[in-house]
Image (cartoon, helix red, strand yellow):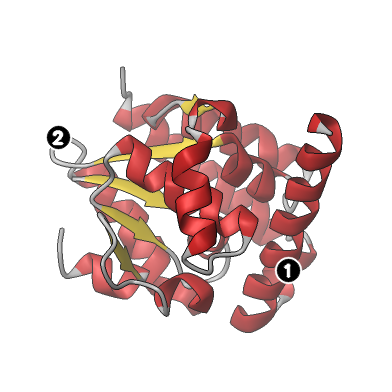
Amino acid sequence: MKNIKEAKKHLQKLRTIISKNPSPIFKMSKEDVIKTLRKTREAIWEEKLAVHH
Amino acid sequence: MLFIIDSNEYIFAFGALKEEKARTLFNKLLDKTHFHNIRIPRTIFEEVKRNLSWEAFHEFNSFITTISMIDEDMVVPFEIVFKYESQGFKPADAFIAAYAEWTGADALISENRHFLSRHINLPFKILTAENCLKFI
């Protein structure tokens, strides 16, 4: 069951946390964010394949 | 409408104002929750998690679990994943496309050019946050 009021609070709090103490990805350009997330995706996928083989 | 939102849109929506469209998209989806739903697979959840601080992740987890549920990757049939791989998608992207098809999503929202360049003849739309805002 969706609780939208709570979701909005969490979203606002999340944005506040990130604005005060941003992890490296939030200091990157748009292209670098996309590139970084592609690498993260590939790493996760390789880990999954390693577990299944 | 049902949307699958790629990890890059989550990051843009949570971060600074330079990607205002992603922020606006999430705000709008939350305001129109009776009309729109979001689903998220474990892979995308994990991608976002790995790029957040522990404190931010805790809040992200709370945010996601109040609006949706996390689908385990194993629920997606491999046949659908293979279909997308044979269309030229990289394996992990093929999984995300297969997940979008399996859930019956109306659209996958992403800024990833690998997706955006392969939007023809798919059972769901692939949209940027900016284009998605025109639909909702």
Residue under numbered circle 2:
B34
Q: Could you tell me which quadrant the N terminus of chain B lies in? A: top left
Q: Residues within 10 Å of mark 2 (few under 14, many from 20)?
A: few
The quadrant in which residue A32 appears is: bottom right
Q: CA distance from mark 2 to mark 1?
A: 34 Å
Say what amino acid the circle numbered 2 marks: His
Q: Is B46 left or right of B42, judged from the image as shown?
A: right
Q: Residue at x 58, y 27 (%)?
A: B74
Residue under numbered circle 1:
A36
Q: Residue at x 44, y 53 (%)?
A: B97
Residue B102: where, in percent of width, then height?
Answer: 36, 38
Say what amino acid the circle numbered 1 marks: Thr
Which residue extends farthest top?
A1
Q: Residue at x 74, y 53 (%)?
A: B51
Q: Is A44 left or right of B37, judged from the image as shown?
A: right
B131 in relation to B63, above or below: below
Residue B135: where, in percent of width, then height?
Answer: 15, 63
Residue B62: where, in percent of width, then height?
Answer: 54, 28
Q: Relative to the observer, which residue lies in front, B56 or B6?
A: B6
Q: Residue at x 21, y 38 (%)?
A: B33
